[in-house]
Image: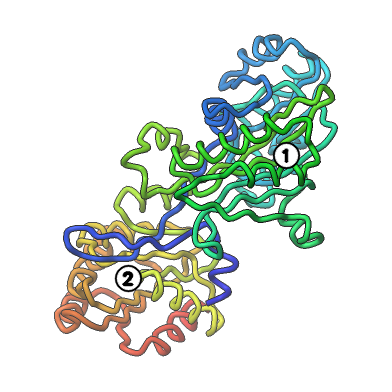
Amino acid sequence: MLFIVNNLFKNLLPNLLSQKNQVQYVLKRRLNVHEYVSYKLLQEAGLPVPKHGIADKKDQIKKLAQDLGTNEIVLKAQVLTGGRGKGTFKNGMKGGVKIVNSVDEAVEAGNKMLGEVLVTKQTGEKGLKCEKLMIAEKKKSKKEFYICIMMERSFDGPVLMASAEGGVEIEEVAAKHPEAIHYFPIDIHKGVEENTALKVVELFKLPQKKDELVKLVSNLYKLFTTKDATMVEVNPLIQDPNDHLFCLDAKLRFDDSAKYRQKKLFEYRDTTQEDPKEVAAGNFELNYVALDGSIGCMVNGAGLAMATCDIIKLYGGNPANFLDVGGGSQTNQIKEGFRIILSHDKVKGVLVNIFGGIMRCDIIANGIVLALKEVKLNVPVVIRLQGTHVKQGKEIIESSKMPVTSIDDLDAAAQAVVKAVK
């Protein structure tokens, strides 16, 4: 189980939802927004950010660079991936974050970034297309800090994290100097109290900026609560040569469960930066995550889905996806889920593992049969059905005459699909 949790689903969290009197676990991806959106939200919350503009066309770059009123300019590719600065565009341009020293240089570099595909360690070879380019003034810094408010299970709620060692990956600080990261639990009934903010002032050794920093911490928490965020991270927060504070980079995450009251915020979601199969699955209220293996999985329930991925791994295979159809899916949703699994070009076999409680085996069976009638099947499919209406489900599969293998035991089913793929 740790293999899946630690390496595959660190951005996922099971939420218990009730729909039509049926309770089911649903995996949610936290809304991830571009940096320019983060800047906009920070500004609206009264937090200081550098002067900047956003270009989505190449002929906009020159004017936006001129409007900054400085020759020290930063160009940032707006792609939803980490490691942009160390990435490479497919046209050979190095770096998704560029510092230039004139408007002409900004235009030259920007033309090689906007509209091009950036490849980073996180994107893999496919990369992500840079549809928007942030053009911002470069800020010099005397000191760099880290500050973040996030939901943290170990604190049973929100916690303020701060470190005087900003400007580098917080994971690196945690690994090398864990004592440099300070945690201040937040009482949701009281919010961030002044004495907590003053501890941050003391940690950053900025007594002359006390009022400004106390206000900054307060505004950070206000943004966190009013936007239903799960994380608001600023790294780095800098003190410039004129002793002004600026948020140079920020990462914001939001609770998908609050979508109904954060409609404007969720309009910033950029599905072009997401896996098309995951987007398609979401449209049918299915929980799909693409993985790197060759065995497609259709399972009901997040826990059983994770266990299924584990057992495939145990017998020498690799899961190609995580697909939890939940407890309330209907035949059409099952059909579309199966189609999405088979659309993965790495899939060499499929394991269906259903333990029917709320989800009925006959609904799963009907969905699979419909999908196989519409999609040319050229990979082995092993089906394991148990639970509610299992007899009817098996009869539907058998009478369909589809070339699938039905196995009752999970271990045997997993071994069979791994063997078939190999």
Which residue occupies 31% across, 41% down?
260
Q: Position of residue 411 (x, y in %)?
A: 42, 88
Q: Which mark is residue 87?
A: none
Q: Is residue 406 left or right of residue 93?
A: left
Which residue occupies 77% across, 36% down?
94
144 or 365, which is in the foreground?
Answer: 144
38 or 163, which is in the foreground?
Answer: 163
Quadrant of residue 400 within the rendered picture: bottom left
Q: In this view, does 357 lie to the left or right of 174?
A: left
Q: Is residue 406 above or below residue 57?
A: below
**Mark in front: 2 vs 1:** 1
Q: Is residue 214 above or below residue 146?
A: above
Q: Where is residue 371 in the image (x, y as percent from the top left)?
A: 27, 62
Q: Where is residue 91 in the image (x, y as percent from the top left)?
A: 71, 34
Q: In this view, does 347 lie above or below 74?
A: below
Q: Is mark 1 on a helix, strand or loop?
A: strand
The answer to whether any part of residue 342 appears in the image is no
User: How busy is the neighbourhood of tag 1: few (under 14 within 10 Å), some, or many (20 plus)?
Assistant: many
Q: What element carries label 2?
A: loop
Q: Position of residue 274 (x, y in %)?
A: 49, 45
**Numbered circles on residues, count:** 2
Task: Give the amino acid at mark 1.
Answer: Pro
Q: Which mark is residue 236?
A: 1
Task: Give the amino acid at mark 2.
Answer: Asn
Tag 2 residue: 300
299 or 152, which is in the foreground?
Answer: 152
Q: In this view, does 384 lie to the left or right of 178?
A: left
Which residue occupies 54% across, 59% down?
152
The answer to whether any part of residue 391 appears in the image is yes
Quadrant of residue 52 within the rendered picture: top right
